Image (cartoon, rainbow, N blue to C red):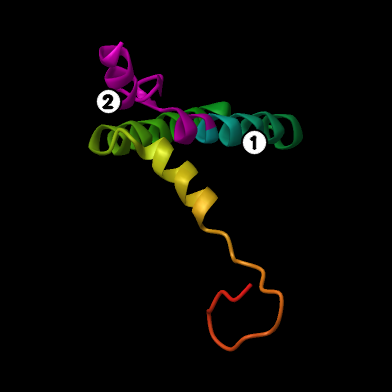
């Protein structure tokens, strides 16, 4: 049972050889923009396909350097919260 847990922690999930979250963000943003540009402006889709591939190669390279990139992005989003104080204080103090 320990092997399964260690394997899941040591090998984070990948999507097309890149970390899941940045890869999904890359595809989820660029592909709709590609279809909107094709539909509204008659722009050649090859420009967008090249940018999608280059963006994915960058994500894969960053994922090879740090395989836990998705976890780091998720942890930053959960911990980077500005606390709400009950009364006014000077500076960046947290006083409930």
Q: Is residue 3 above or below residue 46?
A: above
Is residue 95 depicted above or below 10 in this figure?
below
Instruction: Give the residues in magenta.
Output: 1-24
Name the residue beneath numbered marker 2: 10
Residue 21 shown in magenta: yes
Which quadrant would the C terminus be assigned to in this image? bottom right
**Mark 1: secondary structure:** helix
Of helix, strand and loop, which one carries label 2? Answer: helix
Q: Earlier in the sequence, mark 2 or mark 1?
A: 2
Q: Residue at x 71, y 33 (%)?
A: 36
Say which quarter of the image contains residue 27.
top right
Crowd rating for badge 2 (residues with CA inside 10 Å; few <14, some 14–19, many 20+):
few
Percent position (x, y) of residue 37?
67, 36
Q: Which mark is residue 33?
A: 1
Identity of the residue drawn at 46% across and 51% down: 76
Q: Position of residue 49 (x, y in %)?
A: 49, 27
Of residues 49 and 58, the one nearer the viewer is: 58
Q: Is residue 1 above or below residue 76?
A: above
Q: Position of residue 28 (x, y in %)?
A: 59, 31
Judge left or right: residue 84 versus residue 51: right
Residue 19 among magenta residues: yes
Q: Nearer the viewer, residue 51 or 24?
A: 24
Q: CA distance from mark 2 to mark 1?
A: 35 Å
């Amino acid at each position: 049972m320990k092997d399964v847990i260690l394997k899941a922690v040591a090998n984070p999930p990948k999507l097309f050889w890149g970390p899941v979250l940045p890869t999904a963000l890359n595809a989820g943003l660029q592909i709709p923009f590609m279809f909107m540009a094709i539909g509204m402006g008659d722009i050649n889709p090859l420009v967008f396909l090249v940018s999608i591939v280059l963006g994915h190669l960058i994500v894969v390279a960053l994922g090879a350097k740090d395989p836990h990139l998705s976890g780091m992005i998720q942890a930053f989003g959960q911990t980077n919260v500005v606390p709400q104080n009950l009364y006014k204080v000077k500076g960046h103090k947290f006083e409930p």
